[in-house]
Image (cartoon, rainbow, N blue to C red):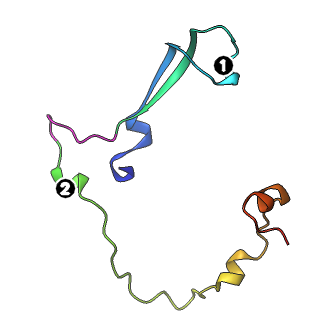
């Protein structure tokens, strides 16, 4: 669906919606409360002037050989400098 979504055109924001929420950030413990709602329009238009090929799915393709100035990186080189917080390591059983 991501290929059908264009954020600046397809984001729908509805402020002050009456809702029953469990979100503590809303600021009220007594339902119902008002909260913003967000919609992402990923539909294909049914009417109007549009090109049906705009919504074709993406497909993998061969991009050819990389330019000579590009040096491929190893997995170790990509991971260098990335750290996982200790609490996350414990949750995913990576801690030594």
Q: Is residue 40 left or right of residue 73?
A: left
Q: Residue at x 23, y 42 (%)?
A: 44
Comparing 26 with 8, the one in front is 26
Comparing 17 with 22, the one in front is 22
Tell me where residue 34 appears, x and y as whole percent.
Answer: 56, 12
Q: Residue at x 65, y 82 (%)?
A: 75
Task: Give the quadrant of the C terminus.
Answer: bottom right
Asked which secondary structure carries label 2, the reply is: helix
Q: Are marks 2 and 1 in contact (CB under 8 Å)?
A: no
Is residue 9 located in the magenta-colored stretch of the structure? no
Residue tagged 2 = 53
Q: CA distance from mark 2 to mark 1?
A: 42 Å
Counting residues from the N terminus, which is met first, the one under dot 2 or under dot 1?
1
Image quadrant where residue 39 sits: top left
Q: Residue at x 48, y 87 (%)?
A: 66
Q: Residue at x 19, y 56 (%)?
A: 53
How many residues crowd around disc 2 within 10 Å: few (fewer than 14), some, or many (20 or more)? few
In magenta, the rendered stretch is: 42-49
Is residue 48 located in the magenta-colored stretch of the structure? yes
Single out the mark in the foreground, 2 or 1: 1
How many residues crowd around disc 1 within 10 Å: few (fewer than 14), some, or many (20 or more)? few
Circle number at residue 26: 1
Tell me where residue 65 appears, x and y as whole percent.
Answer: 43, 90
């Amino acid at each position: 669906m991501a290929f059908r979504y264009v954020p600046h055109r397809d984001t729908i924001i509805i402020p002050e919606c009456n809702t029953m929420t469990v979100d503590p950030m809303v600021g009220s413990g007594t339902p119902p409360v008002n909260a913003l709602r967000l919609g992402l329009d990923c539909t294909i238009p049914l009417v109007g002037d549009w090109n049906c090929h705009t919504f074709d799915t993406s497909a993998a393709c061969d991009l050819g050989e990389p330019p000579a100035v590009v040096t491929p990186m190893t997995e170790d080189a990509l991971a260098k400098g990335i750290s996982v917080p200790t609490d996350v390591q414990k949750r995913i059983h990576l801690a030594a």
